[in-house]
Image: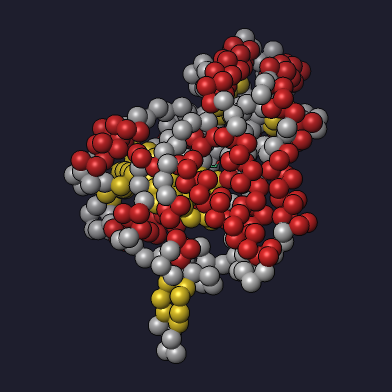
Amino acid sequence: MNQEKIREKFPMLKNDIIFLDSGALVQKPIQVINAINDFYTKYSISNRTSDSELGIIVGQKIDKTRKMTADLLECSEEEIMFNSGTTEGLNYCAQLFSQLINEDDEILISKFNHSSNMIPWIEIAKEKKAKIIFSDDIINDINSKTKIIAYAQKNNSFNIQINAKELFEKAKKYYAFIINDAAQAISHEKVSAKYCDAIAFSSNKFFGPTGLGILYVSKNILAKVSAKKYGGGAIDYINKIGNWKAKNSIVKHEPGTLNLAGIFGFYEAIIFFNSLDKKWMKEYLFDLSSYAYDKLSSLDNVKIVSCKGDSIILFEIKNSTSQDVASYLGHNNVYVRSGLFCAQYLNHIIENSLVRISLHIYNNKQDIDKLIEVLKRGGDFLDFI
Ligand SMILES: Cc1ncc(COP(=O)(O)O)c(C=O)c1O
């Protein structure tokens, strides 16, 4: 499949927009959109209505999707939980792992983390009287007190490369647990359960629908902790005086009706992702990102703070606030982000807030040319021409 063919699969890009914001939301190919439509038009029955043909089909779709997700992450389906997104996954993860945290343990948090992989741990640390360590060199900072290492395999801002195997080996030497926020990595790189104890990501960042998330937690951990969400579908029995027992399977972590349409869409997203040539994808994005870097660098007063080849490009324009730039672009059909990108700790790392463009395989050089053209046109009030 060449790039043009891939781009054609994304109906949203047929509108008159230049979409440079895949860090926030990854566009959906038509097969994902059709699958969501199929659920509501042909299969809209709860999997709990399992004494019916359609209820069984929906249940089987959940099982198959769980298995395909497990294959993607190189783990077992009994380690995969569905939820609403990375943020919920990380919050739940903090609730599970908190059962293994003791007073004075250290929770090592990368300074570049999204707030969703920071605040849940800060709150758990308060509860458990543990200590938060903000780190810009997590491998180096692991020590005998470290219990949790919360990091992102790929950040939504700066491209900080962390060797997952090296991190895992050092963490295990100290009996520490690794939580991998894979929201950004999942559609760009191999994400594997082999090198961590938990992984959270959103279907939304993986060509799939919004409102569905995936959390992997290793069997070892699941055997030691109890579920922290309660309700229908997750319990085995309740007696007259209210003593109850959770089901003895992964569904005990998924009370309530799941996002069924989301699962139908996500199933197709996995098929789409598996069909992509990963080597081509990496090279294509590197070349496109380098092209964008060169074009942006050629503009006076633009200062890029990312490296050439990064698919997330952060920059500022002298004498203009990042929000003014993003707002000007956004009102000219060029979609970018500005500010701190929900990674508020960056405030202590960078001097000025930044504009972010984030590219994916459906983007092309024309998108970049259009960005540059619109930026140049804005020179009158963006002070860079
Ligand atoms: C690195 C990272 N972690 C977590 C999140 C939160 O994801 P969600 O909003 O889908 O819960 C994001 C979203 O941008 C992200 O980029």
Instruction: Please indicate whether residue 204 sits to the left or right of residue 29 in the image.
Output: left
Seen from the viewer's position, the closer of residues 259 and 61 is: 61
Quarter of the image with the C terminus is: top right
Q: Quadrant of residue 34?
A: top right
Which colour scheme appears in the figure? secondary structure
Instruction: Please indicate whether residue 218 sits to the left or right of residue 347 in the image.
Output: left
Residue shown at 46% from the left, 33% from the top: 190
Residue shown at 48% from the left, 55% from the top: 81
Residue 373 visible in image: yes
Q: Horizontal and vertical percent for residue 123?
A: 39, 56
Residue shown at 45% from the left, 60% from the top: 250
Image mark count? 0
Q: Residue furthest top?
A: 298
Quarter of the image with the N terminus is: top right
Q: Residue furthest bottom?
A: 240
Question: From the viewer's perspective, is residue 296 above or below residue 46?
Answer: above
Q: Horizontal and vertical percent for residue 156?
A: 51, 34
Residue 97 visible in image: no
Residue shown at 72% from the left, 25% from the top: 5
Q: Residue furthest left?
A: 144
Question: From the viewer's perspective, is residue 356 above or below residue 240?
Answer: above
